[in-house]
Amino acid sequence: MPLPSRIEAWALLCEWIQSDSLRKHVLAVEAAVRAYARRFSEDEELWGVAALLHDLDFERFPDMDDPENGHPRTALRLFRELDYPPELIQAVAGHAPYLGVPRTTKLDAALYAVDELTGLIMAVAYVRPSKDIRDVEISSVKKKWKDKLFAAAVSRADIEEGARELGLDLWEHVGVVLEAMKGIAAELGLDGRLAAGTLGNQPEH
């Protein structure tokens, strides 16, 4: 089949992913990758759907050492069965360096560069008193970047390599991703509601 619509991709994602935090992660990655698609005058729908679906099987098959079903192998099989565009399949495979699939396109590089960085930026937003990502500046991320114990699971090396593959300075890259995430603050639950103690209902997609 051709590229699924954004609505179709979100429906598929909701079948596979129940975790609120993982859904927020893929939304953050989608927003940033779409920003790069616009920056490079690429196919925003292709890039956005690839980003939205890149962790489709992670909740069910998180063991990346499982050579048969471990993330993202199960998802890649599904995408092939559904005859999704090869560019999407390539990008999802390329974001998992342990698969040994070379990243050869801007989409590959963007997805890889954004994936870890969104987690770091969200962590920075969560520790701010306002719990509002719109209050986060590049300088805030720089400060936490130097603290290797902060969000220690986030690979700074992967983010740096991704920025190089995109041909961007690291902090320019951080700025692009941060601004994209600010644009969906409410969807990420980082619009100040946590500080206000009013979680309310999550936005529908």
Image (cartoon, rainbow, N blue to C red):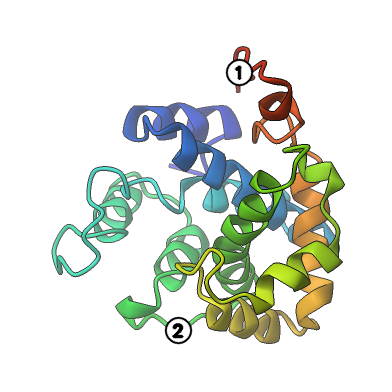
Relative to 89, does residue 199 appear above or below in the rendering? above
- Label 1 residue SS: loop
Residue 82: x %, y % from top left: 34, 44
Badge 2 amino acid:
Pro
Task: Please determine whether, in this image, residue 43 is positioned above or below residue 28.
Answer: below
Which residue is the extreme one toward the front? 129
The N terminus is located in which quarter? top left
For label 2, the SS is: loop
Residue bearing the label numbered 1: 204
**Label 2 near label 1: C-beta < 8 Å?**
no
Q: Nearer the viewer, residue 42 or 25?
A: 25
Q: Is residue 3 left or right of residue 129?
A: left
**Residue 93 visible, this angle:** yes
Which part of the image, by quadrant, shows the C terminus?
top right
Q: Quarter of the image holding residue 164?
A: bottom right
- Residue 77 drawn at (x, y percent): 26, 55
Please state which of the two labelled residues, at mark 1 or mark 2, is closer to the viewer. 1
Q: Residues within 10 Å of mark 1 (few under 14, many from 20)?
A: few
Position of 55 relative to 109 (above/below): above
- Which mark is first along the chain, 2 or 1? 2
Determine which residue is flagged by label 2. Answer: 102
Q: Position of residue 187 (x, y in %)?
A: 67, 30
Distance in Å between CA atoms under marks 1 and 2: 36 Å
Residue occupying image coordinates x 53% and y 52%: 50
